[in-house]
Image: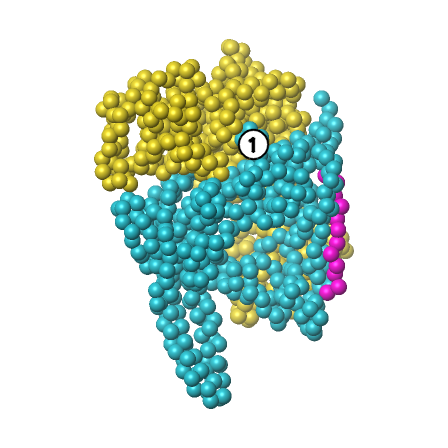
Chain colours: A yellow, B cyan
Amino acid sequence: MKKLVQDDIRTGVFICDCGSNIAGYLEMKELVEFAKTLPNVVFVQENLYTCSEGGINEIKLAIPRENLNRVVVASCTPRTHEPLFMSACEEGGLNPYLFEMANIRDQCSWVHMREREAGTQRAKVQIAMAVAKAAKLRELNRIQLSLSHRALVIGGGVAGMSAALALANMGYEVDLVEKRDRLGGILNELNMILPSNEPPDKLVNNLAARLHDNPKVTIHTGAVVTKTEGYVGNYVATIRQNENENKIKCGAVIVAIGAQPLKPEGLYNYDGKKVITHIELESKLKQGDVQAKNISIIQCVGSRSKERTYCSRICCMTAVKNAILFKEASPDTKITIFYRDMQMYGVENEQLFRKSKRLGVRYVTYDPDRPPRFDGESVSVHHLRMGRDIIVPTDLLVLSTPLVAQDDASEISTMLKVPINENGFFLEGHVKLKPLDFATDGVYLCGNARFPSTIREAISQGLGVASRAAGVLSKEALFTSGIVADINPETCCGCLGCVAVCPYGAINFIENRGICQVNKVLCKGCGGCAATCPSGSARLDGFSNQQIYAQIEQAMAV
Amino acid sequence: MLDVGRHPKINVLAYSEVVDFNGEIGNFNVKVRQKPRYIDASRCTACGACAEKCPTKVPNEFNFGFDDRKAIYKDYAQGIPSVFTIDPDHCKVILGGKCGVCQKVCQAKAVDYEQKESFVDLNVASVIVATGYELFDATQIPEYGYGKIPNVISSLEMERLLSAGGPTRGHLSRPTVIRGEKRLKELPKLIKKAEKDQKEDQKQLLEQEMKLTEEQVHKYHTAKKLAFIQCVGSRDFRFHKYCSNYCCMHSIKEAIIAREHERETESCIFYMDLRTVGKGFEEYKVRGAEVSGLKYIRGRVAEILQDEEMNPVVYYEDTEKRQVVGMTFDMVILANACSPSKGIRNISELLGVELDENQFVKTSPNNPLDTNVPGIFSCGCAQGPLDIPESVAQASSAAARAAEVVMTEGLPIAV
């Protein structure tokens, strides 16, 4: 790249009226005249709308005509319009990173609507700052990378199976890795599923058969992923199966490792026989091994507590489902559910809840400060609605314990450099808007690994995650942004400060050299590392110290 | 929304509806009617000069009539596509009168009073129905007084009042105060006119109204004592038997935000079961009580009446204390149920898609995105009440199902 000396810099400034949004509140003529006086500025143009086709064309034509090598647009917000102006520069033959924007609408004319003179002064400073920074800008390039169009799904439960099948149906090769010897996950332990009213084996077998028949899918059962290296588009994963290790290349990784029921050791004299968990009840029912006539079910055992703060989402409906199945099989079985809030959200659950009441299931609310007690013969509790203690004879006590994170969740989180929350569930990129993505590109999450889910939700999330991953896999090539961080290996002292602040897992510590290195594919250009680095070794291209200082100088010059 | 608007592969047809539909998976023909905006969308830059100068004020339905918009308008600043629209029911020119101000001030020359509806024909491999829901109309429950007692509002009205971009800029004014402030601007003129016309009785009445309104506006400047009523129209055998899924959380959220705006706010949430099943929801509920002082009262509200100062009085049975109680509030916020949208019947007939007994799009637990018509999928509240994370996840899922069709059925793929 030809190094530009200060004298070579020829900046064009385009000042937008934004109809009356800017021109209505600021003295545009004054801004134009002022911009002409700034160093390196050789061309200034006022547009009614710089973003209109006409305005964009003027930028494209002015670059070669005026021999511009920097462009500044003073207009609205870069949030909506920066990409547009950058591509206009590119089409005009200028590196798009030699462009700078001054937001004189949101940050100036809108907030200083009633202060015409002061607002105009302020806009001048903003333009001067942008022009000063523009002079210091350097050409940046987006790097193009090839990628693998294969996906790796870790976990062969219903979520992982749904994800693998959807990806294969879209035409991508998939490796599905399940640590147990067969697919199905926690569904293998269940007895019946409602409201579809079928044994879970039917669903599992159906999905498994379709996966087996699909030539795009490679199923690895009794296998674990022991190592992953690389980044979005270019992962190499090591799969260990019966002492054999093999490496596969993949472009995206899906975490679908599920969750496990909590064993309530020490609670309610839990013994796995007379006092069992609801998952153990499912297994017993499957074997036809339940004779009890007086069944009590206690909700929120080990959840919604100080120790485990969350509601496990699925236990209320599991309890209601089993109560219905009992009542339908033998109507004279007495079933009492001790609960705090019945979490039967939505349409289908509420319907089951009503049905259970119709069948005569008894519901008793308890106060978490005065939980039920079990003496081996009966459950006694303070009935919150009746305001007195009641005793319920019980020959089988079922404890609705929450789903908790898998034992290997934290290992997998470390391996893939993606976060888990305080309960060990994987932490999505944004709880509302990116429920199936991690902040790191190329890694996705679904099912119970994210948070307890119903079967319907797990299937839906499995499909959803397939479409998130396909967003990467369908690309012919990946491009990095030009605005990425870089760490000077000469001065980096390997303190790991940057690694700790990077939200995208984009910085690696190179152990044998004792330094940190930015993965430019994963870097999102947030600048956290550059701000943190105590030795000034990390810098963000497009926001270098020099460039920022140039802006600050202009701001202070007034 | 911005990403959708800017995506090179997404063609947004807003202000439009499907009018004809036929074909089968891999090959659906869809006719879309685009209603006239009376604006050339390719020219409009959404600068807003037109709306600023338009002389015709119309109650703003986006803010539930708490403020006015103009006859040329945009629901809110960030809306996509970023284009203004002329309301043909109120624009003087379109109604045959004289005006034309917007056309005069529009420097982009985008205003076109002659614009006609247009039709777009599409051929697609797959269709996703994501028509959402409607708020349950609480006037159907007369004992809650919605529509009669002004300070009983819906959950969405509350959202607008709390919004920084809303009619009160986020200040929690109750409806009698908002209307009172508006009325106080008119009253002095009316009193003067009555004086001029020598209508003494009328003048006295107006002066009395002025005094009462001033008191109301002054005393209740900020609504500080709030009641949130859950399950309004849901879990109710007269209306929707189902649970609307998200309302417990939005009431807690609104109560917490109200408290953040005004430290003295006290909120009570009246509920049957507080359903906090999502990730972090239970923790949020507990924080609501511990940090924001919310009171959760288990009990269904029987009736809401009004005292002489326009304060709603809530009568309920406290099921934990086993007594009937009446409590006075500054404002009551109803957690309206998630009702199926009215237009869904029409869409379902056009597309041949089956609805369930609640009039949501029918899906099955093992195929949660599939409708009865191969190639047509549905997601979000069109198939039943869902919260935001589940809706977003489902949207991706529906996209995956559609992609399977597009990438296998439509285009043969190499094996």
Q: Nearer the viewer, residue A229 or A197?
A: A197
For the residue pair A173 and A168, the one nearer the viewer reads as A168
Q: Position of residue A115 (x, y in %)?
A: 53, 70
Which of the two residues, A310 or A549, is positioned nearer the viewer here?
A310
Chain name for mark 1? B
- Count of residue discs: 1
- Residue A281: % across, % down: 38, 21
- With B134 as the anchor, is A497 left or right in this view? left
Could you tell me which residue is drawn at 56 percent across and 70 percent down? A116
Label 1 neighbour load within 10 Å: few <14, some 14-19, many 20+:
few
Residue pictured at 50% horizontal, 46% vertical? B338
Residue B50 visible in image? no
Residue at 70% x, 61% y: name it: B38
Quarter of the rendering occupied by the C terminus of chain B: top right
Q: Amino acid at mark 1?
A: Ser
Q: Secondary structure at mark 1?
A: loop
In x, y percent, where is residue A50? 68, 58
Q: Residue at x 45, y 37 (%)?
A: A350
What residue would you read off at disc 1?
Answer: B364
User: At which x and y percent is residue B87?
Assistant: 64, 63
The span picked out in magenta is B113-124
Judged from this view, the residue extending furthest toward the top is A243
Residue B197 in sight: yes
Check if residue B114 falls in the magenta segment: yes
- Left or right of B194, for residue B293: left
The reply to whether the magenta stretch includes residue B15 is: no
Give whichever of A218, B93 is nearer the camera.
Answer: B93
